[in-house]
Image (cartoon, grey):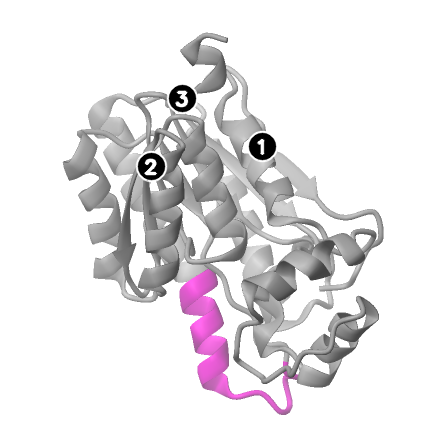
């Protein structure tokens, strides 16, 4: 097999936010193994360092940057650092996201602020910086926004509202870039086996874990160990997708010819769960 087939992203530079775990980590691994030089952005340095090692063992190149995507300057620096390291930017994946599913009457407004700044503001800044960087180097680029099937429902709460905003931003950006050699891609995952639900009611999460035959103490805000997630997904594959499912969709979209725009992809397990 020649390199163009086995490493279709050789010579490309990619940035992935929210890359410490779950979907972001899977996307970074997929892009790195396909030949891209990947800059991982996230909050957990040790986890990202291990992902960098995995990419390098597979013959790829990667670097990790600890950041808080709610800080505009840090998102700008993340993109700028990737450009400085390689001289270009070809792929940006806006994956960082958070959910606090409290009822509106009971919620903490600071949690709303966190969702808006993480899910919407950070994504907007990432898109803006990526467009500027891709135009500057003349890239045939892709901006991938990770939304959610929550954006397909009108009653999906404040989190869903942020993902409706993502879909609107995506559609606007796609129109703005029609005459550029930059394509916007919107990926809407369903329920995926990640620690996304760490801020959900612990009893709800514990019930899902127990249905897979696992006995694990669940504390609100804390991540479940990787080994639990790896056991949970195969046991509940009908209603929980694997992060690799989303990563493969991203790889498919960003390896299409620039004359093709894979505008939207929904990735979900066979059985639907309301998010």
Crowding near pointer 3: few (<14 within 10 Å), some, many (20+)?
Answer: few
SS label for mark 1: loop
Q: Residue at x 77, y 48 (%)?
A: 269
Magenta span: 102-119
Q: Is residue 186 left or right of residue 215?
A: left
Marked residue nearer the N-terminal end (2 or 3) = 2
User: From the viewer's perspective, is the residue at label 2 or at label 3 nearer?
Assistant: 2
Nearer-the-camera pick, 234 or 23: 234
Q: Which mark is residue 179?
A: 3
Crowding near pointer 2: few (<14 within 10 Å), some, many (20+)?
Answer: some
Q: Residue at x 31, y 39 (%)?
A: 130
Examine the rendered structure and indicate whether residue 212 appears above or below residue 112: above
Instruction: Give the spatial CA distance, label 2 vs label 3.
Output: 36 Å
Examine the rendered structure and indicate whether residue 254 appears above or below residue 199: above
**Pointer 1 with pointer 3, Cβ within 8 A:** no
Q: Residue at x 64, y 90 (%)?
A: 105
Instruction: Give the spatial CA distance, label 2 vs label 1.
Output: 31 Å
Q: Residue at x 63, y 84 (%)?
A: 104
Looking at the rendering, in which quadrant would you find the C terminus?
bottom right
Residue 150 appears anywhere in the view: no
Examine the rendered structure and indicate whether residue 259 appears above or below residue 231: above
Residue under pointer 2: 56
Q: Position of residue 139 (x, y in %)?
A: 30, 23
Q: Position of residue 231 (x, y in %)?
A: 69, 59
Q: Which mark is residue 263?
A: 1
Within the image, what quadrant is residue 193 found in? bottom right
């Amino acid at each position: 097999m020649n390199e163009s087939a086995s490493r279709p992203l050789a010579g490309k530079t990619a940035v992935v936010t929210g890359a410490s775990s779950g979907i972001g980590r899977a996307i970074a691994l997929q892009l790195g193994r396909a030949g891209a030089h990947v800059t991982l952005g996230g909050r957990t340095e040790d986890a990202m360092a291990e992902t960098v090692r995995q990419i390098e063992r597979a013959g790829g190149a990667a670097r990790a940057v600890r950041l808080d995507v709610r800080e505009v300057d840090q998102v700008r620096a993340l993109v700028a650092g990737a450009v400085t390291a390689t001289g270009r930017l070809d792929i940006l994946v806006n994956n960082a996201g958070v959910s606090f599913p409290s009822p509106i009457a009971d919620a903490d407004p600071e949690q709303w602020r966190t969702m808006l700044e993480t899910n919407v503001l950070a994504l907007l800044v990432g898109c803006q910086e990526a467009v500027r960087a891709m135009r500057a180097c003349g890239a045939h680029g892709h901006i991938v926004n990770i939304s959610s099937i929550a954006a397909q429902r009108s009653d999906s709460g404040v989190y869903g509202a942020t993902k409706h905003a993502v879909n609107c931003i995506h559609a606007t950006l796609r129109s703005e870039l029609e005459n550029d050699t930059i394509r916007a891609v919107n990926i809407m995952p369903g329920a995926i086996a990640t620690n996304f639900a760490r801020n959900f009611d612990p009893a709800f999460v514990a019930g899902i874990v127990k249905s897979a035959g696992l006995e694990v103490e669940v504390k609100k805000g804390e991540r479940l160990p990787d080994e639990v997630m790896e056991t949970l997904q195969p046991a509940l594959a009908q209603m929980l997708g694997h992060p690799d499912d989303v990563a493969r969709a991203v790889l498919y979209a960003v390896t299409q010819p620039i004359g093709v725009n894979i505008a939207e992809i929904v990735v979900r397990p066979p059985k639907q769960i309301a998010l």
